[in-house]
Each structure stands twice: as C-alpha cells, then as structure tokens.
Image (cartoon, rainbow, N blue to C red):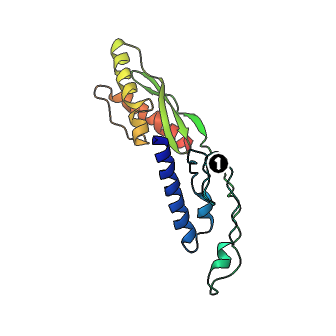
C-alpha cells in the first residue's frame, strides 16, 4: 500500500513537472532533463512522455519548440552547444627554498621554506644553536613559534615574525635566513 502511494505521488509530481516545463515558452532542453519517475505497481504503464526508473527515455513525438513559437520568433531550432572542453587547473608547483646560514654568538641558524605557487606552506629550521642546554631550549622556542605549517611564517606569509623573548639573537638570525629564502623564492 505504501509503495503504491509513493509511486502514484511520484507519478503525479513527475507529470506536473512535465506539464509545467513543456507548457512554458522557450523551454528547450529542460524537459529532457526531468528526473525519472517510478512506475506504479500492478503492471500499469505510465502515461506517454514520462520516464520510468531504469528505462530508456522515449522519443518525443512533438515538434521542436522553435516551430511552435509565434511567427515573430525564428522558426529554426537552436543548435545544441557542443560539450565544453574542460581543462584542469594548473597545479601549483611545490618547491623548497633554503636560506643562507646566518651566524650569531650562540651558533648558526638556517631556514628552509616550502612554497606552493606563491604561498609559503611550511617553514623548517635546518640549523639552530645547540651549544648549551639554554641555547637548545631557546632554539626549541624559536622553532616552535616560527616553523611548521601552522607557525608564524606560514600564517603571516613573510619574515615579519615576533621576536621570542630571551632568544633575540636566534630570532633575528632566523628572520635574516628566512628573508633570504623568501627573496630567492620570488
């Protein structure tokens, strides 16, 4: 019972859509793109002009829309447009650009950036001062704040990063190597 009700409702909706689309002037291709309607159960065949699920659409026995239009309009059917050629968007090239080694009183700093197209997507400190435990700790702070895909370098897309408190020399060396890498990437 429920299936029959759904089939009849679907048939009614499909028929209504067909009448509305077929009856409006200048419709053209829209009537061909109606969704399929389920056939009612019980072996009944759907009305002419409606589609059933899994069945091939029937050929229309009506004349083209252009020949039914008033004489003020052109009486030739519009040619269907050819399928559009789709071209894939050019893929952004990903490249790694390395800045120079910048020396400071605590050690060397070198930065590498990963650039996709014109955007910086990652920054990596290749070398940071690690002479003492204190240098190592401060280098980790600098690396944690600036490097990585979510670091300040990627967020700001520039070498304008905040100085890490207590690691001014390392922060400045990182900025200089980073700026050189950015300049090379351009």
Residue furthest toward the top?
Answer: 133
- Name the one closer to the observer, 137 or 144: 144
Q: In which quadrant of the rendered image does the C terminus lie? A: top right
Residue tagged by mark 1? 88
Label 1: few (<14), some (14–19) or many (≥20) C-alpha neighbours in 10 Å = few
Q: In this figure, what is the number of numbered marks?
A: 1
Query: Is 99 left or right of 75, judged from the image as shown?
Result: left
- Above or below: residue 172 compared with residue 35: above
Which type of secondary structure does the marked residue at label 1 adopt?
Answer: loop
For this orientation, the residue located farthest to the left is 165
Asked if residue 48 can be seen in this view, the reply is yes
Question: x, y percentage for residue 144?
Answer: 38, 25
Q: Quadrant of residue 175?
A: top left
In the image, is residue 102 above or below residue 115? above
- Residue 65 is situated, as x and y percent measured from the top left of the image, at 64, 73
In-image side of 156 versus 119 (left or right): left
Image location of residue 130, percent across then percent down: 41, 16
Identified at 58% across, 57% down, the residue is 34
> Looking at the image, is 111 positioned above or below residue 29?
above
Kindly identify the residue that appears in the image at 68 percent across and 64 percent down.
60
Q: Residue at x 35, y 12 (%)?
A: 133
Q: Is residue 135 left or right of residue 74?
A: left
- Which residue lies at the image location 60% right of the left edge and 50% below the top edge? 44
List x then y, in percent, for residue 13: 49, 56
| Farthest bottom residue in view | 72
Specify whether residue 110 is in view. Answer: no
Say which of 13 and 89 sits in front.
13
């Amino acid at each position: 019972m429920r299936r029959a009700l759904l089939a009849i409702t679907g048939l009614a909706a499909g028929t209504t859509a067909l009448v509305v689309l077929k009856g409006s002037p200048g419709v053209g291709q829209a009537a061909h793109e109606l969704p399929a309607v389920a056939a009612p159960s019980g072996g009944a065949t759907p009305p002419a002009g409606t589609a059933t699920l899994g069945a091939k659409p029937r050929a229309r026995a009506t004349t083209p829309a252009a020949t039914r239009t008033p004489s003020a309009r052109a009486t030739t059917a519009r040619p269907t447009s050819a399928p559009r050629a789709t071209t894939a968007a050019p893929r952004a090239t990903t490249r790694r650009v390395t800045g120079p080694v910048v020396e400071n009183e605590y050690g060397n700093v070198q930065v590498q950036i990963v650039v996709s197209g014109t955007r910086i997507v990652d920054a990596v400190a290749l070398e940071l001062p690690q002479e003492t435990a204190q240098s190592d700790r401060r280098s980790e702070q600098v690396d944690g704040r600036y490097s990585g895909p979510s670091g300040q370098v990627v967020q700001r897309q520039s070498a304008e990063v905040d100085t890490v408190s207590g690691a001014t020399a390392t922060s400045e060396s990182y900025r200089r190597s980073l700026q050189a890498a950015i300049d090379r990437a351009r």
